[in-house]
Image (cartoon, rainbow, N blue to C red):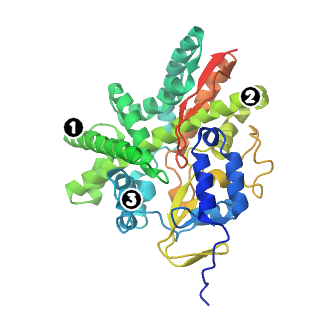
């Protein structure tokens, strides 16, 4: 017997009010109490913009591990009536990236990428990352001698672009541009982006399109020993149409730069911020540096870069006690789910000795290809900081971008002492 829709017990206006509070300065600085309110509304609640929000860890895990639930790909986006939301240049650029592809296209593209960061490849680039860790910390230390310094701009924003930029073989003079473009492009993935945010995202999408179109053209004409040249060569064997082959290499390059910068920047800044906000845990880590890998995962649980992940129903599907219609979207509120007390003991405690499961790198077929690289950057940075940086403290409240889906720390001012 087919399940029937029931009248939602939660008014959408209640949920909309909660999201408005999440965007405030107070909500950005600590969204956890609001996520607790959201979980208390139910494991699945109606979304203010249609579809559903999923708040429980178990149901988020079920959907993300499923091979039937889909991501909102290009076909889904172009079928939506809200062109201003789903059919903008930035949104459609995102839809071409690996995380927004469904099988069989996803399977083909993922195989073409290979194992980007296996143990042997990580060993090759570890020396480069370690060298860049010392460079950014040299500058950070020198600024600390002058007074308060912004850890975010000097270290968290700088290390990822140096790491991925050197790996891709990009000129260091382009790093600032790429950092700015990626930060703006992700604005299109917010729940209700404002017109100004959409304009920034679309301008960034065009900038990334121009930059990597030129890069693919250059690497095709003069191949080198770099990932972009390798992707071009791989797609030449898979796709006889050269224009399509170049488009696939282009999409992979855009995906890698956006994913490597935006999420890793947040991981590094959030990791240091949480340790400074929990001095007892920092002292525990100093006594047990073997916990450093756990800190990366606990940070990704406690405050991941991505707090909401989108999926669409492949057919009429019962999720928990709710019928989700074919093509309807669910937003997996992983920022809330990763504080679900049914999954974690004392979920509100930041615990450097915890080895938590989390969705910080996704799950299932969409598990992040760059997870080993992000882990390595976090481990090398924290290892060096514990050895060489004097005791520091947060000198003023952190400044946040007013986002919900993609967290963004704009400034983290710290001082010695």
Q: Nearer the viewer, residue 202 or 245?
A: 202
**Residue 121, position in %: x, y?**
47, 39
Label pair 1/3, CB-CB below 8 angstroms: no
Residue bearing the label numbered 1: 222
Residue ID at (38%, 54%): 91
Q: Quadrant of residue 85?
A: bottom left
**Residue 243, position in %: x, y?**
21, 54
Disc 1, SS = loop
Disc 2, SS = helix
Q: Which of marks 1 and 2 is in front?
A: 2
Residue 54 at least partly seen: yes
- Of the residues under marks 1 and 2, which one precedes in the sequence? 1
Residue ID at (36%, 69%): 79
Residue 96 at least partly seen: no
When the figure is inspected, residue 35 is found, relative to residue 224, above or below; the finding is below
Residue ID at (32%, 37%): 225
Residue bearing the label numbered 3: 86
Disc 3, SS = helix
* Placement of the C terminus among the 4 image quadrants: top right
Q: Nearer the viewer, mark 3 or mark 2?
A: 3
Q: Which of 262 and 113 is in front in this view?
A: 262
- Of the residues under marks 1 and 3, which one precedes in the sequence? 3
* Placement of the N terminus among the 4 image quadrants: bottom right
């Amino acid at each position: 017997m087919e399940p029937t829709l029931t009248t939602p017990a939660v008014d959408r206006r209640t949920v909309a009010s909660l999201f408005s509070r999440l965007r405030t300065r107070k909500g950005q600085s600590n969204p956890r109490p609001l996520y607790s309110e959201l979980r208390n509304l139910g494991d699945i609640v109606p979304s203010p913009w249609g579809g559903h929000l999923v708040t429980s860890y178990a149901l988020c895990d079920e959907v993300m591990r499923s091979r039937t639930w889909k991501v909102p790909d290009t076909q889904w986006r172009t079928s939506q009536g809200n062109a201003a939301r789903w059919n903008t240049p930035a949104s459609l650029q995102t839809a071409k990236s690996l995380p927004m592809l469904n099988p069989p296209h996803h399977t083909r593209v993922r195989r073409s990428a290979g194992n980007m960061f296996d143990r042997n490849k990580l060993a090759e680039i570890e020396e480069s990352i370690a060298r860049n860790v010392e460079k950014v910390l040299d500058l950070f230390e020198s600024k600390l001698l002058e007074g308060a310094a912004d850890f975010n701009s000097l270290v968290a924003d700088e290390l990822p672009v140096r790491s991925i930029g050197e790996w891709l073989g990009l000129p260091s003079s382009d790093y600032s541009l790429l950092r700015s473009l990626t930060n703006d492009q992700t604005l299109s993935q917010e729940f209700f982006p404002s017109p100004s945010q959409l304009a920034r995202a679309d301008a960034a999408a065009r900038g990334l399109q121009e930059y990597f179109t030129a890069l693919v053209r250059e690497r095709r004409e003069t191949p080198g020993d770099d990932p972009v040249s390798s992707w071009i060569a791989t797609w030449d064997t898979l796709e006889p149409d050269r224009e399509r082959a170049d488009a696939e290499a282009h999409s992979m390059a855009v995906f890698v730069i956006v994913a490597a910068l935006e999420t890793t920047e947040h991981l590094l800044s959030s990791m240091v911020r949480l340790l400074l906000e929990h001095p007892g845990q920092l002292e525990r880590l100093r006594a047990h540096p073997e916990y450093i890998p756990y800190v990366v995962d606990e940070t990704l649980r406690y405050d991941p870069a991505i707090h909401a992940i989108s999926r669409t129903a492949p057919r009429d599907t019962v999720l928990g006690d709710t019928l989700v219609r074919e093509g309807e979207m669910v937003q997996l509120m992983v920022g809330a789910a990763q504080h679900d007390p049914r999954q974690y003991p004392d979920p509100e405690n930041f615990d450097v000795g915890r080895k938590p499961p989390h969705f910080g790198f996704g799950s299932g077929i969409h598990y992040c290809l760059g997870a080993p690289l992000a882990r390595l950057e976090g481990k090398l940075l924290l290892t060096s900081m514990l050895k060489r940086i004097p005791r520091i403290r947060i000198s003023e409240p952190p400044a946040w971008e007013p986002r919900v889906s993609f967290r963004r720390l704009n400034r983290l001012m710290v001082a010695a002492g």
